[in-house]
Amino acid sequence: MLRFLTMRIAAAIPLLFILSVVTFAIIQAPPGDYGDYIRTQAINQGGASYEEAEAQAQAYRKEHGLDKPMLVQYVRWITGIVTAGDFGYSLYYNRPVRDVIAERLPRTLILALFCHIFASILGIGAGIIAATKQYSWIDTVLSGISFLGMTVPRFLMALIIIYILVFQLNVSEIGNFFSPRYGGAPWSWEKFVDLIQHVWPVATIAIFGGLAYNMRVMRGNLLDTLNAQYVETARAKGLSESQVILRHAVPNALHPLIMYQGMVLPYMLAGEIETAIIFGLPTVGPAIVGSMQVGDVYVTATFMMLLAATLIAGNIIADMVLALVDPRVRLAGGN
């Protein structure tokens, strides 16, 4: 098992390096940088002339190394990450990128992981019910829900919920995790309830999409497994249908679904990020959008690389779980 894990991690390191190069290059491909933002702010808010503003922008570029070639900037950035865990300095937030990550990334990961767990449990359960009730009205309803969850854009669902909350229910506190009175208060039951009242729209949309994908995969896998010969043999031995399904069919139908979890976790992260941008929650999504708008390359590149690392980590975890469930995977991996 240790060799299996080592091989997976060893294969992930060069992939992550390639992704960091591609990400950094794509982010810097559009014209302009944070110096342009400095110049615009100096003209619009400081009343400076174009020449004065451009001088300020050039001085800022030189101070923070933005006047260097892209390759030099990348080498400095990646070297700082590898040697000192330094992700650079956020020009927009005016503090180290490490601090921005520490503030926003845990919120995103906790919320996405919470949604992922609930979506997996509900989706697998719904998939089992739909498969065992094939072509019944229950299967039709659950399949319809799955179809909606996979096809309706998440940003559209977010906009609909915002419209209902603001214009129909007159909700005013949107765009934060807590009400002002609970922002700096110690944890209590009332603060937890307030948190749920603020994040339930984002969690609901992310869970709905993940549930749909999990249910669709589980239903298809279980239908294939229920037609297998060993399942017919279990029925012929006199086992009850519930024993046949839960003890024989479901465990084997979970194998492809376990591998699928490596893709679902990044999907849940993307769903949380996309929805959080609409609701304005202080998580990774708005930080990426804000940094891209002003050319804060280190924040954008770091968050994108961390999301890519999450995708890789999700697949490694799925491989490990599948290897624990099925020894054939370990043998195929070289153990």
Image: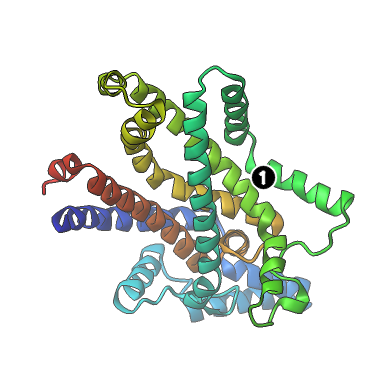
Colour scheme of this structure image?
Answer: rainbow
User: How far across and down, in percent of the image, does residue 70 sit?
Assistant: 41, 63
Left or right: residue 11 compared with residue 246: left
- Dot 1 crowding, Cα within 10 Å, few <14, some 14–19, many 20+: some
Residue in view at x 32 percent, y 21 percent: 235
State the SS at label 1.
helix
Residue in view at x 53 percent, y 57 percent: 114
Residue in view at x 46 percent, y 58 percent: 304
Which residue is farthest front? 238
User: How far across and down, in percent of the image, does residue 188 sit?
Assistant: 66, 77
Residue 295 visible? The answer is: yes
Q: Which residue is mark 1?
A: 155
Instruction: Residue type at mark 1: give it.
Output: Phe
Q: Quadrant of residue 47?
A: bottom right
- Asked whether 260 or 89 is in front, the reply is 260
Left or right: residue 134 compared with residue 75: right
- Asked whether 219 or 83 is in front, the reply is 219
User: How far across and down, in percent of the image, does residue 303 sit?
Assistant: 48, 62
